[in-house]
Amino acid sequence: MEVLDFLRTIYNDEDIIQNADMKQLTTFKVGGCADFLVYP
């Protein structure tokens, strides 16, 4: 999935993924990788 590759490239750090909401993105972290990306 292109979204997964994008997230792994941009949000390759767990702390960044956990704080992704600061970037107006809602992410669901699975195994340290963002599995889903939802635009509010």
Image (cartoon, rainbow, N blue to C red):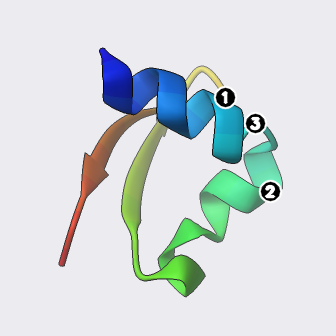
* The disc label shown at residue 12, or none: 3
Residue 17: percent from left, percent from top: 64, 53
In the rendered image, the vertical position of residue 31 relative to residue 7, given as above or below: above
Instruction: Tell me the distance, in whole angstroms, between the alpha carbons under discs 3 and 1.
Output: 9 Å
Tally the marks. 3
Residue at numbered disc 2: 15
State left or right for residue 33 relative to residue 6.
Answer: right
Q: Between tags 3 and 1, which lies in front?
A: 3
Closer to the camera in the image, 28 or 10: 10
Q: Between tags 3 and 2, which lies in front?
A: 3
State left or right for residue 12 relative to residue 18.
Answer: right
Name which residue lies at 30% across and 14% down: 1
Name which residue lies at 21% across and 68% down: 39
Kindly indicate the quadrant of the structure image that contains residue 10: top right
Residue type, numbered disc 3: Asn
Name which residue lies at 51% across and 34% down: 6
Residue type, numbered disc 2: Asp
Instruction: Tell me the distance, in whole angstroms, between the alpha carbons under discs 1 and 2.
Output: 9 Å
Q: How crowded is mark 3: few (under 14 residues within 10 Å), some or many (20 or more)?
A: some
Q: Earlier in the sequence, mark 1 or mark 2?
A: 2
Residue at numbered disc 1: 32
